Image (spheres, grey):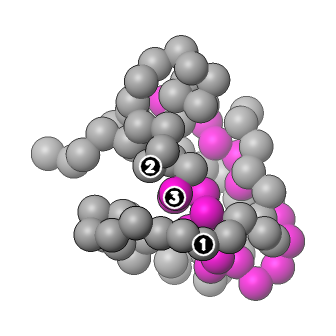
Amino acid sequence: MREAADEKRIRRFIQSLGAAALDEGVCYLTGGATAVLLGWRSATIDVDIALEPEQDEVLRAVPTIAVDQRRARFAGRLHPVTASVA
């Protein structure tokens, strides 16, 4: 079973997406991740995203980011991707 994604883990995931992006864009979070970031629940089992515009390098990085988050802490940057709660 997967480890639950709490607020800290979701924010690390967003930072990792930003580090993978080559161009500016927006990452919309939906579903359980939104509920966690708005304080409605403590964790979710997955993080649903929509990228505007889609960036191949970011989409290719998602599997690696998920594995890396289980192994180590990431201290990256968010820019150039802006994360928004939808």
User: What is the x, y in percent for residue 85?
Assistant: 71, 36
Residue 54 shown left or right of residue 17 in the figure: right
Front residue of this view, candidates 52 and 39 = 39
Q: What is the spatial separation of the Cα atoms under label 3 and label 1, in whole angstroms?
A: 10 Å
Q: Residue at x 82, y 65 (%)?
A: 25
Residue type beneath disc 1:
Gly
Q: Label 2 belongs to which residue?
A: 9
Q: Label 1 belongs to which residue?
A: 76
Q: Is residue 31 above or below residue 52?
A: above
Q: Which mark is residue 40?
A: none
Magenta stretch: give its range.
Answer: 12-32
Please tell me whether residue 8 belongs to the stretch shown in magenta.
no
Front residue of this view, candidates 6 and 49 = 6
Q: What is the spatial separation of the Cα atoms under label 1 and label 2, in whole angstroms?
A: 13 Å
Q: Residue at x 56, y 20 (%)?
A: 39
Within 10 angstroms of label 3, few (less than 14), some, or many (20 or more) residues? Answer: many
Q: Are marks 3 and 2 in contact (CB under 8 Å)?
A: yes
Is residue 31 visible to the viewer in this orientation of the structure?
no
Q: Residue at x 70, y 77 (%)?
A: 21
Q: Residue at x 80, y 57 (%)?
A: 82
Within 10 angstroms of label 1, few (less than 14), some, or many (20 or more) residues? Answer: some
User: What is the x, y in percent for residue 50?
Assistant: 66, 52
Q: Label 3 belongs to which residue?
A: 13
Residue type beneath disc 3:
Phe
Q: Is residue 49 above or below residue 70?
A: above
